Image: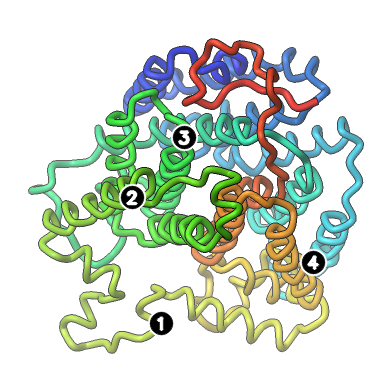
């Protein structure tokens, strides 16, 4: 099945299948469950046979973990675990590391930095579920860096992986469209909108739609036509950004904007010799249409909400508009700055070993009892100085990304993945698959596909093709 998905012979059919899966999730979980295990089981033998490249394994793994939110919406647990992305990504990365016999010093150091917090609990209230909830994300980031660091794949392989990750997001899009009430039934306010998020967490839905928006934009500017038709790709881009903005949760859409700005920066500031060498996309022809579509979606949503969307992104709340509160960083970040400061204060009190994995929410003076939303402050509070070392390594890896890929647009895409992955950890910690997956992709080395490497040369070049790097 994964081979069929990668060959992309019938892109419109594949898009419709995933939209129908989203519709079916509003009625029964068994459609998602059946499709998930059909792909997993039918692809397992192919993955085991293909040992020359990481491409097939990564494609299957990233496709399946992208069902995490749709599976939650369909209530597929326990058949598909609630935190699918964490568990499956961890298992898949360990399998890949063992099979590839990878030994990565940076990833190993990061894992060692996480160990002491398992044996510390200053609060005395931490349960095993708290440890898994908080630490498995950073573990996956370390494993992803170990497995992906300096691995070489082709640019078309990268496009194929991105395309596979978008399909389940289309299912979430279909689910929210069907579950969302009419606009005249919604009372818009200056907070996250659960109703227009399909009745689910607006922050998680916004994060996923922001990721999908960024992915479609990347495919457009690289001329990797997602559906094979520009107008269909443009409509998908509009729908993802439109629905993401309707959630009124800013994190995901601001992440997409950050990624787009980074890519444009690398394209626009590249030396002329590289511009000609790599035939970089022209801003007016390929980049500008994507920006116009996203801007149009903002204008439409702002009109629907009578200007509340603009106020929301300006950091206004009902309290600041009524004059009962002053607009500050505390109100703009909706409590995340409070959590950050509370965690840093805990670190100062427990500088070396921290308060222990999962313990910060029980001890934090600000927003006590609230789970961490800012991963860097959680690392400091719960892992102490070892968490600080972990974060320094993560920062150094970001700088190293700029060294290994000469092509400006590829360098921009990979650095955008890294920054969006880090940024996501500042508003949603590392509780989803987004941060480990993006940081893992960001440390790859991307090369042009080898001439004659495609097994099926008749497939149009406009779509990412199945290419195995030897």
Q: Residues within 10 Å of mark 3 (few under 14, many from 20)?
A: many
Q: Residues within 10 Å of mark 4 (few under 14, many from 20)?
A: many
| N-terminal label among 3 and 1 | 3
| N-terminal label among 2 and 3 | 3
Counting labels gives 4
Q: Secondary structure at mark 3?
A: helix
Q: Does the residue at mark 3 contact the one at mark 1 (Cβ under 8 Å)?
A: no
| N-terminal label among 4 and 3 | 4
Residue 305 pos. (x, y %): 14, 58
Residue beneath label 4, please?
117
Residue beneath label 2, please?
284
Depth check, mark 4 against mark 2: the one in front is 2
Residue 196 pos. (x, y %): 25, 47
Residue drawn at 38 percent across, 44 percent down: 286
| N-terminal label among 4 and 2 | 4
Distance of label 2 from label 3 (alpha carbons): 25 Å
Residue beneath label 3, please?
166
Residue drawn at 56 percent across, 68 percent down: 374
Depth check, mark 4 against mark 3: the one in front is 3
Residue 120 pos. (x, y %): 80, 69
Q: Residues within 10 Å of mark 2 (few under 14, many from 20)?
A: few
Q: Secondary structure at mark 2?
A: helix
Depth check, mark 3 against mark 1: the one in front is 3
Residue 178 disc label: none
| N-terminal label among 2 and 1 | 2
Residue 330 disc label: 1
Residue drawn at 54 percent across, 18 percent down: 5
Left or right of 311: which side holds 391? right
Depth check, mark 2 against mark 1: the one in front is 2
Q: Image height check: is 190 above or below 415? A: below
Location of the C terminus (image quadrant): top right
């Amino acid at each position: 099945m994964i081979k069929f998905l990668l060959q992309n012979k019938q892109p419109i059919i594949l898009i419709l299948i995933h939209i129908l899966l989203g519709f079916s999730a509003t009625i029964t979980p068994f459609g998602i469950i059946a499709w998930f295990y059909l792909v997993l089981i039918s692809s397992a033998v192919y993955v085991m046979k293909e040992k020359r490249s990481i491409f097939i394994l990564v494609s299957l793994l990233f496709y399946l973990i992208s069902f995490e939110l749709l599976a939650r919406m369909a209530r597929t647990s326990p058949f598909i675990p609630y935190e699918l992305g964490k568990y499956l990504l961890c298992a898949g990365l360990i399998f890949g590391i063992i099979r590839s016999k990878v030994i990565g010093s940076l990833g190993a150091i990061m894992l060692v930095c996480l160990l002491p917090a398992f044996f510390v609990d200053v609060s005395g209230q931490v349960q095993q579920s708290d440890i898994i909830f908080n630490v498995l994300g950073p573990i996956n980031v370390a494993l992803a860096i170990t497995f992906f660091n300096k691995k070489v794949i082709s640019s078309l392989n990268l496009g194929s992986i991105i395309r596979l990750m978008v399909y389940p997001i289309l299912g979430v899009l279909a689910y929210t469209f069907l579950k969302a009430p009419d606009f005249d039934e919604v009372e818009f306010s200056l907070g996250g909108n659960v109703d227009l998020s399909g009745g689910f967490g607006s922050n998680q839905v916004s994060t996923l739609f922001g990721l999908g928006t960024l992915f479609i934009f990347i495919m457009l500017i690289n001329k990797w036509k997602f559906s094979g038709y520009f107008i269909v790709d443009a409509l998908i881009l509009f729908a993802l950004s439109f629905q993401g903005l309707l959630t009124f949760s800013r994190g995901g859409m601001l992440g997409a904007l950050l990624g787009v700005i980074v890519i444009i920066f690398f394209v626009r500031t590249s030396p002329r010799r590289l511009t000609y060498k790599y035939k970089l996309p022209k801003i007016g022809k390929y980049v500008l249409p994507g920006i116009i579509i996203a801007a149009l979606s903002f204008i439409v949503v702002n009109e629907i909400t009578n200007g509340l969307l603009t106020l929301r992104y300006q950091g206004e709340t009902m309290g600041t508009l009524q004059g009962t509160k002053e607009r500050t960083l505390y109100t703009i970040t909706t409590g995340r700055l409070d959590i950050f400061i509370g965690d840093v204060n805990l670190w100062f009190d427990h500088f070396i070993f921290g308060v222990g994995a999962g313990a910060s929410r029980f001890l934090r003076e600000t927003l006590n009892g609230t789970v961490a939303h800012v991963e860097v402050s959680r690392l400091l509070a719960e892992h102490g100085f070892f968490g600080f070392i972990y974060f320094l390594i993560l920062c150094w890896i970001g700088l190293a990304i700029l060294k290994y890929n000469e092509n400006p647009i590829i360098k921009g895409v990979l650095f955008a993945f890294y920054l969006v992955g880090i940024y996501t950890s500042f508003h949603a910690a590392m509780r989803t698959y987004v941060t480990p997956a993006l940081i893992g992709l960001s440390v790859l080395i991307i090369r042009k596909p080898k001439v004659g490497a495609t097994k099926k040369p008749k497939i149009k070049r406009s779509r990412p093709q199945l290419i195995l790097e030897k």
